[in-house]
Image: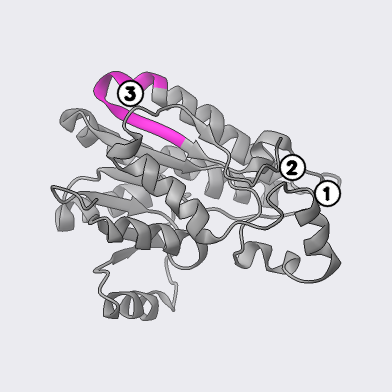
Amino acid sequence: MPLKTPRVALVTGGMGGLGEAICIKLAGLGYKVVTTHSPGNTKAAEWLDAMNKQGYGFRAHGCDVADYDSTVACVQKVVAEVGPVDVLVNNAGITRDMTFKKMDKVNWDAVMKTNLDSCFNMTKQVIRPMMKARSGSIINMSSVIGEMGNAGQSSYAASKAGIIGFTKSVAKELGSRNIRCNAVAPGFVETDMTHYLKEGEGAEKYKADIPLGRFASTEDIANVCLFLACDMGSYITGQVISACGGLNI
């Protein structure tokens, strides 16, 4: 059901893969969608033009979500252009997979700053207008790895587990202002981050552990985000929805 009144959705890391699917879903329901991309992304203008030729009306801003001052400037631009943010989807994330023995501080910090610090940075910028409006939905992209752990992914697992704790705490603090905060924990999703698993014995090995027998599509996960963003999920907060095909059973 389309929105009765226009709302603004800000999706970090929305160019391609899961982020793009989330942007498309939200736009389809009538949200004014703004996304972020890494500063200096040479393909940003091309992506935005291609999306808007399809009628989506997206806006996009360069923003280093790991840098606090950059997120301040980004959200200020969004508010000036389209108004306060009603829905924030903290989707931007990276991996630096390696055994813990080989993990160095530089790679550890990169993952923590991009995946976890970004949630603090972006959430900090949007909550005051949400509190004033007594309305808002914050959706943080965690992972089933944050619930289960995984060999070779200590930094990624730690960052995604941190997001879960962050989500629950924010939900408890802001619930009285009618601001909801939830996390989505995907399993394996067919994106560029899992391209190396799509073919051969590796993919079949992982699929054998998934009761539904397949990787998620980006649309599968975007549908969960849409549910949490809109009024259909109006009584859900502080929850982790494991969209993993049953991997974590």
Residue at 30% x, 42% y is 230
Range of residues picked out in magenta: 172-182
Could you tell whether 165 is left or right of 180 in the image?
right
Q: Which numbered dot is residue 154?
A: 2
Q: Position of residue 93 (x, y in %)?
A: 55, 53
* Residue 89 seen: yes
Q: Amino acid at mark 3?
A: Leu
Q: Which numbered dot is residue 115?
A: none
Q: Residues within 10 Å of mark 1 (few under 14, many from 20)?
A: few
Which one is in front in this view, the residue at disc 2 or the one at disc 3?
A: 3
Query: In terms of sequence position, does the residue under pointer 1 or pointer 3 come before the other?
Result: 1
Q: Position of residue 183 (x, y in %)?
A: 49, 37
Query: In terms of sequence position, does the residue under pointer 1 or pointer 2 come before the other?
Result: 1
Q: Secondary structure at mark 3?
A: helix
Q: Amino acid at mark 2?
A: Ser
Q: CA distance from mark 2 to mark 3?
A: 30 Å
Could you tell whether 192 is left or right of 148 in the image?
left
Name the residue carrying label 3: 174
Could you tell whether 152 is left or right of 66 in the image?
right
Residue 197 higher or lower than 86, as above or below: below
